[in-house]
Image: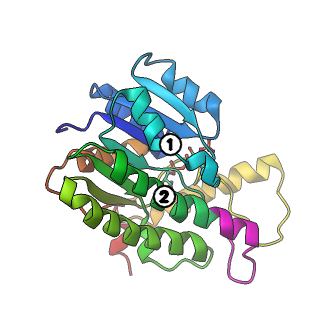
Amino acid sequence: MTGTRKVLITGGGTGIGRAVAEALLRAGGSVVVSGRRLELLAELTASFPGRAFALTCDLTSASDREGLLARARQLLGGLDGFVHSAGVVMHQPPGHIDEASLREQLEVNLVAPLRLGEQALEVLEPGGGMVFISSTIAHRALLTSAVYSAAKAGLLQVMRSLALAGAPRGVRASSVLPGVVDTDMVRTLRLAPGEPLPSEAERATRLEAQLERLGALHPLGRLGRPEEVADAVVYLLGAPWTTGAELVVDGGVLLRE
Ligand SMILES: NC(=O)c1ccc[n+]([C@@H]2O[C@H](COP(=O)([O-])OP(=O)(O)OC[C@H]3O[C@@H](n4cnc5c(N)ncnc54)[C@H](OP(=O)(O)O)[C@@H]3O)[C@@H](O)[C@H]2O)c1
């Protein structure tokens, strides 16, 4: 990794964000992890005193978002990387998309990364990098993900504008587009609209089937692991002549018709 060692990671308490934080810490970097659930952030920071810090933040709140990057810079004594891994998906087909889900998905997946990216332009040191976790779903139709897909596709355009804006100072912005990765986000049973929650035993069986079905969609035959996406993020953070890039890490799923 060239130079990028002090990094703020949203969604850093779980899944891909946590794997990014752990990879950076293993490589000798220092991190601020952000999310709503302090207990998850504290699990990580407790193992790396002096090199890992937690900042709680609800990314749907403009006042929580305000100054987040400056606070991270203060904690770390500088900031040369920003990773937006926080994200939320609610599977609802058109006709069943409720207003609160729509607003939350747009706020966390699109508005927050734009606003935090603007902060990053001001706060990141020259040569620093931002990485936004988009999704292969930005490029594919899925019946139940109109809002999530729109937000993740919009995020790619946000990333490109930030890349242009940051270029004169050498500040870079890119995206990673994962296929389906085995995290909490995917380990949530997808129910049909109005379907009551099944019994615990039935939930477990159906969830296993769901994971198997999702894994089989990928030509490489399985779900991704958070660490496999984290490797791509760490690469982009430290790639000095790469900006505006979309790095697909998807087990080949975009090869499918
Ligand atoms: N897993 C996949 O298959 C997959 C595929 C493509 C893209 N992605 C993207 O990858 C990123 C990471 O997701 P993941 O798979 O690692 O799932 P995850 O474990 O569910 O992570 C989502 C993170 O977002 C944070 N978050 C959600 N709402 C928030 C809010 N209002 N304010 C602050 N933080 C919030 C959560 O922390 P708190 O709940 O503690 O706030 C959590 O740490 C997301 O952007 C997701 O869209 C995932």
Of residues 181 and 230, the one drawn nearer to the viewer in this rendering: 230
Give the residue displayed 62% in from the left and 58% down from the top. 209
Residue 92 in the magenta stretch? The answer is yes
Q: Which mark is residue 242?
A: none
The secondary structure making up most of the magenta span is loop
Residue highlighted by disc 1: 68
Question: Please, what is the three-letter code of the amino acid marked with disc 2?
Answer: Arg
Of residues 229 and 79, the one drawn nearer to the viewer in this rendering: 79
Question: To which quarter of the image does residue 176 belong?
Answer: bottom left
Magenta segment boundaries in residue numbering: 90-104
Give the residue displayed 67% in from the left and 70% down from the top. 102
Residue highlighted by disc 2: 115
Of residues 121 and 222, the one drawn nearer to the viewer in this rendering: 121
Give the residue displayed 36% in from the left and 37% down from the top. 7
Q: Is residue 230 visible?
A: no
Against 213, is 232 above or below?
above
Residue 183 placed where, x, y %? Answer: 53, 47
Against 256, is 224 above or below?
above
Pointers 2 and 1 in contact (C-beta within 8 Å): no
Give the residue displayed 76% in from the left and 72% down from the top. 98
Residue 141 in the magenta stretch? The answer is no
Residue 9 placed where, x, y %? Answer: 44, 42
The local secondary structure at tag 1 comes to helix
Q: Is residue 157 visible?
A: yes
Give the Cα separation between the discs numbered 2 and 1. 10 Å
Against 120, is 192 above or below?
below
Is disc 2 surrounded by few (<14), some (14 to 19) or many (20+) residues within 10 Å? some
Question: To which quarter of the image does residue 189 belong?
Answer: bottom right
Residue 169 placed where, x, y %? Answer: 21, 54
**Colour scheme in the image?**
rainbow
Location of the N terminus (image quadrant)? top left
Is disc 1 surrounded by few (<14), some (14 to 19) or many (20+) residues within 10 Å? some
